[in-house]
Image: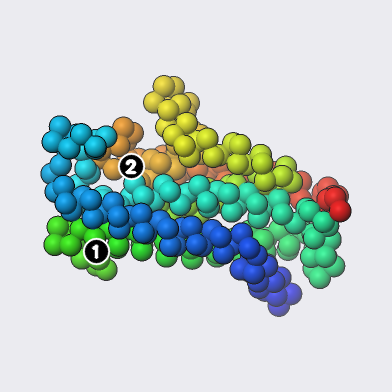
């Protein structure tokens, strides 16, 4: 147990000392809340009852007060997907994984430690970023918004749904990266879905709702979104994607040569 705990700490140190971790933190922890603040200021100037008829710059009517700010959450989803894919494939470069296995010879423990370390890091950054985004949104709305710290029951529920979506998609990207030993594959699969391809397919064909990003969007869909808020369906579909990917990548990890090129 001590050896496994030490392996988890080792994986956490590797993640937090990597350059990609700090780049992702800068993008989602700093830039996303800043964009939310700018958007909230513009909403406060227009008024929360603004519509595309009264303000042509709006593509659609503003959602109810409890749901404001969650459109900005999609900005950080892309960096998190990139983070998971890079982390899953990175150690196959320059035989870094061989060094890890010299410290911990059990591939099973190494795989579990990597997943748990990623779960801890993604939970931390997702919770911090999404709460900050929603809190700053209502701070920017001034008297028109909710209390920036207490928010509302609905807002807290949707923060939880958004955090869950970020965590599961990050782990899914990680699993695909481990399976294919290449960060390009999860990015090619998931990034176009983040850029509305998943929602487009879901609106055109029923099977599109079972793609991971489209299923994740069901978790925190607002009343003004073109798709229905169905957290149970979205959560189950996304969780199945994650579990199947981790099972396959687990067997590939423990049964194949670590590979890698110098």
On the picture, is 127 further left or further right than 246? left
The location of residue 127, given as percent across then percent down, is 42, 62
Q: Residues within 10 Å of mark 2 (few under 14, many from 20)?
A: many
Quadrant in which the N terminus appears: bottom right
Q: Is residue 24 visible?
A: yes
**Disc nearer the start of the sequence (2/1):** 1
Residue at figure coordinates x 13%, y 44% from the top left: 49
On the picture, is 114 further left or further right than 216? right
Residue at figure coordinates x 84%, y 61% from the top left: 98
Distance from label 2 to label 1 (Cα)? 22 Å
Residue 221, labelled with which disc? 2
Residue at figure coordinates x 45%, y 52% from the top left: 76
Element at label 1: helix
- Picture quadrant of residue 139: bottom left
Residue that numbered label 1 is attached to: 139
- In front here: 73 or 172? 73
Residue at figure coordinates x 73%, y 62% from the top left: 110
The location of residue 229, given as percent across then percent down, is 32, 40
């Amino acid at each position: 147990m001590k050896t496994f705990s030490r392996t988890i700490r080792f994986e956490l140190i590797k993640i937090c000392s990597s350059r990609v971790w700090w780049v992702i933190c800068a993008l989602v922890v700093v830039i996303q809340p800043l964009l939310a603040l700018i958007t909230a200021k513009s909403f406060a100037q227009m008024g929360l009852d603004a519509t595309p008829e009264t303000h042509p710059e709006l593509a659609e009517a503003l959602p109810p007060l409890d749901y404001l700010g969650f459109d900005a959450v999609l900005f950080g989803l892309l960096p998190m997907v990139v983070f998971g894919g890079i982390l899953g494939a990175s150690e196959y470069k320059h035989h870094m994984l061989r060094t890890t296995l010299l410290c911990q010879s059990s591939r099973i423990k190494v795989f579990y430690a990597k997943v748990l370390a990623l779960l801890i890091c993604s939970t931390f950054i997702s919770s911090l970023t999404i709460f900050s985004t929603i809190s700053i949104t209502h701070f920017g709305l001034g008297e028109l918004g909710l209390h920036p710290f207490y928010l509302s029951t609905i807002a807290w529920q949707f923060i939880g749904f958004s955090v869950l979506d970020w965590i599961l998609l990050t782990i899914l990207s990680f699993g695909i990266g481990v399976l294919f030993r290449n960060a390009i594959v999860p990015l090619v699969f998931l990034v176009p879905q983040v850029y509305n391809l998943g929602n487009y397919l879901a609106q055109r064909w029923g099977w599109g709702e079972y793609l991971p990003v489209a299923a994740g969007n069901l978790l925190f869909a607002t009343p003004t979104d073109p798709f229905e808020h169905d957290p149970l369906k979205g959560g189950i579909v996304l969780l199945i994607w994650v579990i199947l990917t981790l099972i396959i990548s687990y067997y590939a990890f423990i049964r194949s040569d670590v590979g890698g090129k110098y």
